Amino acid sequence: MNHLIAINRGIKNRAYARAMLRLQAENKLLDSLKAQRQISDKPYHFYKSRVENLSYILDLETDRLTSDQVGATLAKFTENPYGYPEIYHHQMIESASDKYITQKAPYLNLKDGVNRDYRAVYTTIWNSTIFPEKDKNYLLARELSRIKETFPKADFLAFFQKFEQDVKDTALVSTIRAQYALEFDESRNATKSVVLTDSKGVKTTFDNLLKSHKGKVVYVDFWASWCAPCREGLPNSLKLRNELKGQEVVFIYVSIDRTMKPWQAASEQENLDDYRENYLFVNHQTSDFTKQQKLSSIPRYMIFDKTGKLVYANAPSAESKTLPGLLTGRAK
């Protein structure tokens, strides 16, 4: 392992000079454009910040900065006056945290075989003197996300409670709580029903939804923000939905995303955010319906008849030429 680390460090050091020359050239170009008034203040500041932070990351990766020097650099940091996200500053503090903290945390025998104990990382970040309060809060939120994805729910809830106590930024705590709202929802553990929520947090069950559309054929599209084939099919679904407007057909979209934020962002991108029948499957992991229908792979489409009976458990996708006939009863 030490031999591999030494090889990796050697590769980075050989690439360092070339990378720094490119960043220095970019820096000079920005200053030249600024002097000639060919770039406005906001993009100038953004790209200067990019060069500065990438330079710091290169120094970090090649052991040219000590943790004390990183701490001194971060202590002098001031937020930009333009309100854009400090993505490159965040990359820099993530690199510093990974180098000085994560790489020293214990390995665990987890699914990918390389994960560290992010619970230990969280605690070390909290006790660290390297990071100013705002940067520390950002990193604690990142570790909280890693804990949620890696460890049992009880561990996540315990560390979220710690996060609420550790972080004095109430706005950030509220944002993180909203992001993981479903983790605090007891209906997430329901087995007998399919629990759905809309983007405003209003919940219903799939049975009640079908009852509300009695007398109409219901076409259900199971998808997720991370599913590329699902999202590729959504424009066709929107087109067909518009073509069948006025018919006794309802399109319902059910995401199996595990958190609200990515689903909401994807819904907006796919023009579903203002559509009434767009839901998140709250208890996808525990629902008997998931197991009975083997709803482990998506995209997946279902058709329910006008009485609410499932008639096609594996229905065609929206681009299929046979689907309109199945939905309108005019199948050939």
Image (cartoon, helix red, strand yellow):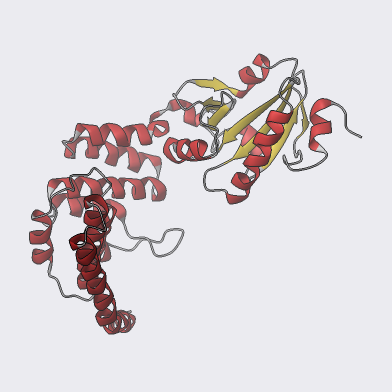
For the image, the number of numbered tags is 0
User: Along the line of sight, which residue is nearer the eye, 46 or 172?
Assistant: 46
x%, y% of residue 259? 44, 38
- The answer to whether residue 330 is visible is yes
Quarter residue 82 falls in: top left
- The answer to whether residue 293 is visible is no
Q: Residue placed at 30% from the left, 34% from the top? A: 175
Residue at the outermost front position: 36
Residue at the outermost right position: 332
User: Along the line of sight, which residue is nearer the eye, 194 or 279?
Assistant: 279
x%, y% of residue 140? 24, 47
Vertical placement of residue 36 versus 263, above or below: below
User: Along the line of sight, which residue is nearer the eye, 238 or 277?
Assistant: 238
| In this picture, residue 49 sits left or right of residue 260 | left
Vertical placement of residue 262 versus 308, above or below: below
User: Along the line of sight, which residue is nearer the eye, 125 or 48?
Assistant: 48
Q: Residue placed at 28% from the left, 76% from the top? A: 19
x%, y% of residue 237? 67, 37
x%, y% of residue 129? 10, 55
Q: Residue placed at 74% from the left, 31% from the top? A: 303
| In this picture, residue 304 sits left or right of residue 137 | right
| In this picture, residue 272 sits left or right of residue 33 | right
